[in-house]
Each structure stands twice: as structure tokens, then as C-alpha cells.
């Protein structure tokens, strides 16, 4: 009995101590919170007093207005050459000369590769000798035939013999011409699939040439957007390798067959000759579908603060106020704003450095009512 009472007493003392600790921790938390609030209040008050003492800063600004831009759909793809030549061997033989490497630029007619022609030369000599013999025989029979000393059958056989020998000689010379492979077009070597000393086989691809001066962008357009694409229609093109630049291309072909896996159509777009572009570069085409109203702000006006995108606007009291915005696509010198601004707001676009939240501002001359080009 005494043991039970002792245990009960100890339990009550423990609970009492826990309640005291909880009360102590709660009191400390309240004190810390009060201190933080006081410090922040003093900080804000100090910052506000600091702003009152700071002179106004001169800034440039634009007045927010709704603008009309083209509504577009985009499609991605890669650059390819309009002139591509894959060269292959027509005969079997060892490569005895190879004069190019990947990346080399060659002109049409340049010798690229030569296959050992020793055996073929022997065939040409043999065919030439056969032709010479057939020619001598034909000339002799022809002379006799003219003197009525040879029969009509002998004349026909001699004629057939020289024609057969002539065909054999042409075939042998053609085989010899196959030992030299020349560039059919001017362009850049993009593939080399054989080396000097290796055996070339008939039909084996050896060298690939692409003309990088005549490029096109091939994109896949979704079937729901293909209605906006017509051959001959101009289209804006951007290439990832040339950021900040765009070009005007022309739709040259819409392949009239949809890919059943991607539900898209292949569209080929001719683009102007631009230095630095090569096949394989990634690009995007923008097809106009109509027009829409948007709000644009200069890229220089966009500010990042605490991981949020926003702009400084001029309040009715003439102070800079940070306004969080939701950004969209870039259009020329401006960026589209979905939410956070309304028509008539004055957005500060330049003339300051660092944080200006709450600062008194004065608009520079011609700093109001500017516009953003697209």
C-alpha cells in the first residue's frame, strides 16, 4: 500500500514539473516572438525614416498599355541541307587515295577518293586489243566485200564483231572511271566511312557531302495546327545557336502524310543563307494564326526579388512600389505580362541601381508614355 502511494506521489510530481517546463518554454517563445516583432518594426520604421531623408531619384518609365501582337503556334525541328550527296562505290577494290576528312569543304569536280585500278587497267588493255583486232578484221572484210570478194554473211559477222569489241571497250573504260570518285556538288564533308587501304565494295556508302549554303528547317507541326501552314507563306524562324536573332523563312513543302505515332506533319521551310548555320542545328518556326491583345513591359524593367519576378511601378504618391507579375513569352524588346499590371500603370524601366522599394521617384524627360517595340 505504501509503495502504491509513493509511486502515485512521484507521478504527480513529474507531471507538475512537466507543466512548469511547458509553461516556461511557452513564455520564452512569446518573449522571442515579441522581440522579433519589435526588431522588425524598428527596422521598418528605420527604413521608412531613411527613405524620408533620401532625395528623390530620377528614373525612366513606360505607361502600361494593351498592344496587338500576332498570335502564333510554334513547331520545333532541325536544319538540313537541300543539296545532299551520299557517294558510294560501284566496284570492288582497295582505296589507294583518300584526300578528304570530315569538315573539309570541297568544290564540285574535286577528286575525293581513288580505288586501285591495276586489275581494271589490264581489262581496259585487253578490251582495247580486242577492239583493235576486230577493227582490222572489219576493215579487211569490208574491202573484200566492196570488191565482191566476201559474202554478205562474212560482212555481217565482221560488223557484229567490231560492235561487240567496241561495247566491251566502252564498258572497260567505264569501269576505270569508277575508280575515281569526285564531288558532284560543292559542300562540306560530313561523313567519311572508309579509310585508305580498306576494301570498298559495290554499293557501299563512302562519303557524304552537304551544301551548307542552301539550308532549310524541317519541323513537325501538330495536326491541329497544320491548317495555319501553307506553301509560300512567310514564317518567323529562330535558331538556338544564334540567340536573340530571328529570320524570315518561306514554307516550301508540307508533306501530305501525318505521322500516326506523333499525329504531326513534316513541314520544310527555306531559310536565307546566314553565316554560322550548319545542318543539325536545333530551331523553331512560328506560324501566325491571328492577332491578340497583350501587355508588354521592357525586359530592363523586370526585377527578381526573393525568387519572385516583378517590376517597380510608380505609386500615386510618387514612390517606387515592387509589384509581383506573372511573365509570358518575349516579343522583340518586351516581355508579355499575364497578371499583376493594368492599363495605365507606370512601370519603371531604368535609371536606378539596387533596391528602390518605397523611394521617391521623379520621371526623367520623355520617361513617361514610352512603348515597347515587338
Image (tube, rainbow, N blue to C red):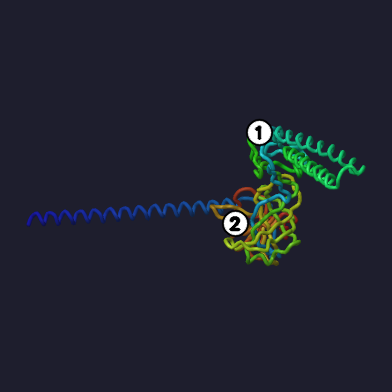
Residue 310: give its label.
2
Disc on res. 196:
1
| Crowd around label 2: few <14 · some 14–19 · many ≥20 (10 Å) | many
User: Of the residues tagged 2 and 1, which is closer to the observer?
Assistant: 1
Q: Quadrant of residue 327?
A: bottom right
User: Is 96 positioned to the left or the right of 164 in the image?
Assistant: left
Seen from the viewer's position, the closer of residues 143 and 366 is: 143
Location of residue 73 with respect to 273 vertically, above or below: below
User: 35 left or right of 348?
Assistant: left
Find residue 37 and report its horizontal and vertical position in percent.
45, 55
Q: Identify the image quadrant of residue 12.
A: bottom left
Of all residues shown, which one is farthest toward the right? 147
Relative image position of residue 90 (x, y in whole percent): 69, 43
> What is the quadrant of residue 293 in the picture?
bottom right
Q: Who is closer to the viewer here, 326 or 301?
A: 326
- Decide if residue 63 is on the left or right side of residue 304: right
Q: CA distance from mark 2 to mark 1?
A: 63 Å
Q: Secondary structure at mark 2?
A: strand
Q: Is residue 348 above or below residue 230?
A: above
The quarter of the picture where the N terminus appears is bottom left
Amino acid at each position: 500500500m505504501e509503495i502504491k502511494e509513493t509511486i502515485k506521489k512521484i507521478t504527480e510530481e513529474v507531471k507538475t514539473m512537466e507543466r512548469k517546463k511547458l509553461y516556461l518554454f511557452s513564455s520564452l517563445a512569446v518573449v522571442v516572438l515579441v522581440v522579433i516583432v519589435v526588431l522588425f518594426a524598428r527596422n521598418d520604421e528605420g527604413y521608412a525614416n531613411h527613405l524620408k531623408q533620401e532625395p528623390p531619384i530620377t528614373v525612366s518609365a513606360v505607361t502600361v498599355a494593351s498592344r496587338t501582337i500576332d498570335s502564333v503556334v510554334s513547331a520545333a525541328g532541325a536544319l538540313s541541307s537541300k543539296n545532299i550527296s551520299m557517294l558510294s562505290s560501284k566496284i570492288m577494290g582497295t582505296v589507294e587515295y583518300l584526300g578528304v576528312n570530315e569538315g573539309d569543304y570541297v568544290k564540285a569536280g574535286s577528286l575525293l577518293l581513288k580505288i586501285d585500278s591495276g586489275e581494271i587497267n589490264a581489262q581496259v588493255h585487253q578490251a582495247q586489243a580486242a577492239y583493235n583486232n576486230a577493227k582490222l578484221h572489219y576493215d579487211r572484210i569490208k574491202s573484200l566485200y566492196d570488191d565482191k570478194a566476201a559474202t554478205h554473211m562474212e560482212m555481217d559477222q565482221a560488223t557484229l564483231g567490231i560492235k561487240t569489241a567496241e561495247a566491251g571497250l566502252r564498258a572497260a573504260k567505264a569501269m576505270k572511271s569508277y575508280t575515281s570518285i569526285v564531288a558532284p556538288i560543292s559542300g562540306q564533308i560530313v561523313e567519311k566511312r572508309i579509310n585508305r587501304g580498306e576494301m570498298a565494295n559495290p554499293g557501299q556508302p563512302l562519303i557524304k557531302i552537304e551544301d551548307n549554303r542552301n539550308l532549310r528547317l524541317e519541323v513537325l507541326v501538330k495536326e491541329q495546327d497544320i491548317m495555319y501552314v501553307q506553301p509560300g507563306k512567310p514564317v518567323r524562324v529562330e535558331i538556338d545557336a544564334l540567340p536573340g536573332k530571328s529570320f524570315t523563312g518561306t514554307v516550301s513543302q508540307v508533306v501530305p502524310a501525318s505521322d500516326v505515332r506523333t499525329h504531326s506533319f513534316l513541314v520544310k521551310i527555306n531559310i536565307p543563307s546566314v553565316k554560322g548555320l550548319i545542318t543539325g542545328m536545333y530551331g523553331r518556326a512560328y506560324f501566325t494564326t491571328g492577332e491578340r491583345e497583350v501587355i508588354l513591359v521592357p525586359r530592363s524593367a523586370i526585377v527578381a526579388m526573393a525568387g519572385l519576378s516583378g517590376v517597380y511601378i510608380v505609386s500615386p504618391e510618387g514612390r517606387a512600389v515592387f509589384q509581383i507579375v506573372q511573365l509570358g513569352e518575349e516579343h522583340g524588346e518586351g516581355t508579355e505580362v499575364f497578371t499583376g499590371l493594368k492599363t495605365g500603370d507606370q512601370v519603371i524601366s531604368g535609371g536606378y541601381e539596387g533596391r528602390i522599394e518605397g523611394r521617391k521617384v521623379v520621371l526623367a524627360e520623355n520617361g513617361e508614355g514610352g512603348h515597347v517595340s515587338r
